[in-house]
């Protein structure tokens, strides 16, 4: 997590304002520590999350909205409730958000 590109993402998000970038960086690690249930996945959980990815349940769009925010497109019809739980969906969305930082 501590490579140059990872750190640069926080600076870009906060338009190179060091104080705000550091606060976002700090909040990211607080979130990771507080909600490890959603981020530390067993092999079985990771398999289900990967299957959600493969079926095209959700993905970030290339274009941004009018406020330059990333958009995550979710196709609810591709969510098979016999295979996946709501926890799987939450984990998947969180992983997308972490990847977008």
Image (cartoon, helix red, strand yellow):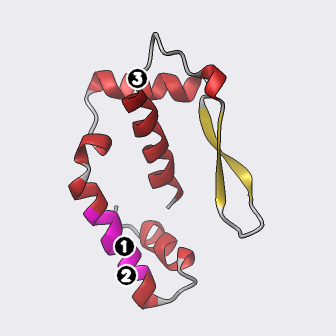
Contact (Cβ within 8 Å) of mark 1 with mark 2 = yes
Precedes in sequence: disc 2 or disc 3? 2
> Which of 100/81 is in front?
81
N-terminal of the pair, mark 3 or mark 1, is: 1
Q: Which dot marks residue 25?
A: 1
In front: label 3 or label 1: 3
31 or 1, which is in the foreground? Answer: 31
Q: Position of residue 82 (x, y in %)?
A: 46, 10
Quarter of the image for the N terminus: give it: bottom left
Local packing at callout 1 (Cα closer than 10 Å; few below 14, some 14-19, many 20+) is some
Percent position (x, y) of residue 12? Answer: 56, 76
Q: Dot 3: few (<14), some (14–19), or many (≥20) neighbours within 10 Å?
A: few
Looking at the image, residue 10 sits to the left or right of residue 23; the answer is right
Q: Residue at coordinates 53% horizontally, 56% vertically from top-left?
A: 100
Above/below status of 88 relative to 22? above
Distance, label 1 to label 2, CA atoms, is: 5 Å
Tag 2 and tag 3, C-beta contact below 8 Å: no
Q: Is residue 100 visible?
A: yes
Which residue is pictured at 25% across the width and 29% down the height?
A: 42
- Residue 1 lies, with reference to residue 84, above or below; the image says below
- Could you tell me if residue 2 is visible in this image? no
Circle 3: element type: loop
40 w.r.t. 4: above or below: above
Q: Write down the residue under mark 2.
A: 22
Q: Position of residue 9 (x, y in %)?
A: 50, 70
Crowdedness near tag 2: few (<14), some (14–19) or many (≥20) residues, C-alpha within 10 Å: some
Distance Cα–Cα, label 2 vs label 3: 35 Å
Q: On the image, numbered disc 3 is attached to which residue?
A: 85
Q: Is residue 12 above or below residue 54?
A: below
Answer whether residue 89 is magenta in the image: no
The span picked out in magenta is 21-30
């Amino acid at each position: 997590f501590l490579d140059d590109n990872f750190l640069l993402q926080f600076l870009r998000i906060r338009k190179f304002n060091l104080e705000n970038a550091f606060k976002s960086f700090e909040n990211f690690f607080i979130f990771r520590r507080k909600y490890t249930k959603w981020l530390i996945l067993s092999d079985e959980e990771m398999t289900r999350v990967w299957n959600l990815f493969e079926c095209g349940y959700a993905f970030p769009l290339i274009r941004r909205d009018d406020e330059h925010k990333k958009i995550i497109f979710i196709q609810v019809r591709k969510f098979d409730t016999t295979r996946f739980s709501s926890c799987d969906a939450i984990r998947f969305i969180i992983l997308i958000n972490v990847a977008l930082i």
